[in-house]
């Protein structure tokens, strides 16, 4: 059963972190830090957190592709703003020379697992009545 507190969220009031990031997830503190109001950035970092919770702690390149593809998929699914062009370029930058389609194909099972985790969490924690 997933923990009720998957991550702590801290909104920072600056445009980017010292590393030039718009957000980050720390596995050690289970904390998401955001430096933007972008829904897609939040979903990207949330996807990192869930992917980590599911035991996927492999190379950074794969994790970035999974997180960005998940963010775009979830934003689209939940009616939020998704920048597909940005997602394509982001995934391309982390694909290490392989075609974007291969990187996406390799990430699909993990994207589905992240989506299922969220839906299961909603069923367990957001019951009405």
Image: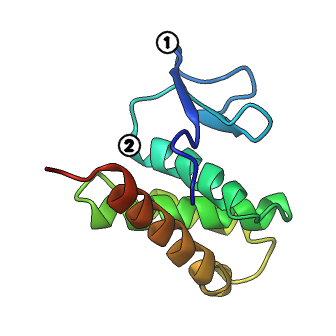
- Kindly give the residue lying farthest to the front in the view shown: 129
Q: Is residue 84 visible?
A: no
Q: Residue at x 27, y 60 (%)?
A: 78
Q: Quadrant of residue 72?
A: bottom left
Q: Residue at x 22, y 58 (%)?
A: 79
Give the number of the disc on residue 39: 2
Instruction: Using the image as rendered, state which of residue 52 and residue 99 is in the foreground.
Output: 52
Q: Position of residue 98 (x, y in %)?
A: 76, 81
Q: Residue tagged by mark 1? A: 13
Question: Along the polypeptide, which appears first: circle 2 or circle 1?
Answer: 1
Q: Quadrant of residue 104?
A: bottom right
Q: Position of residue 10 (x, y in %)?
A: 54, 22
Q: Label 2, secondary structure: give it.
A: helix
Q: Label 1, secondary structure: give it.
A: loop
Q: Is residue 122 above or below residue 34?
A: below
Q: Is residue 104 left or right of residue 80?
A: right
- Kindly give the residue lying farthest to the top in the view shown: 13
Q: Is residue 74 left or right of residue 29?
A: left
Q: Residue at x 61, y 87 (%)?
A: 105
Q: Quadrant of residue 31?
A: top right
Q: How is the image coloured?
A: rainbow
- C-alpha gap between disc 2 and disc 1: 16 Å
């Amino acid at each position: 059963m997933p923990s009720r507190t998957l991550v702590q969220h801290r909104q920072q009031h600056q445009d980017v972190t010292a590393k030039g990031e718009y957000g980050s997830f720390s596995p050690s503190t289970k904390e998401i830090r955001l430096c933007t109001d972008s829904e897609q950035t939040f979903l990207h970092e949330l996807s990192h957190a869930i992917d980590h919770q599911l035991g996927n702690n492999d190379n950074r390149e794969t994790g970035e592709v999974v997180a960005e593809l998940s963010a775009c998929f979830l934003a689209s699914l939940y009616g939020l703003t998704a920048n597909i062009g940005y997602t394509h370029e982001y995934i391309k930058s982390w694909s290490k020379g392989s075609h974007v389609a291969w990187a996406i194909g390799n990430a699909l099972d993990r994207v589905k697992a992240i989506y299922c985790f969220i839906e299961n969490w909603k069923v367990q924690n957001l019951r009405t009545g």
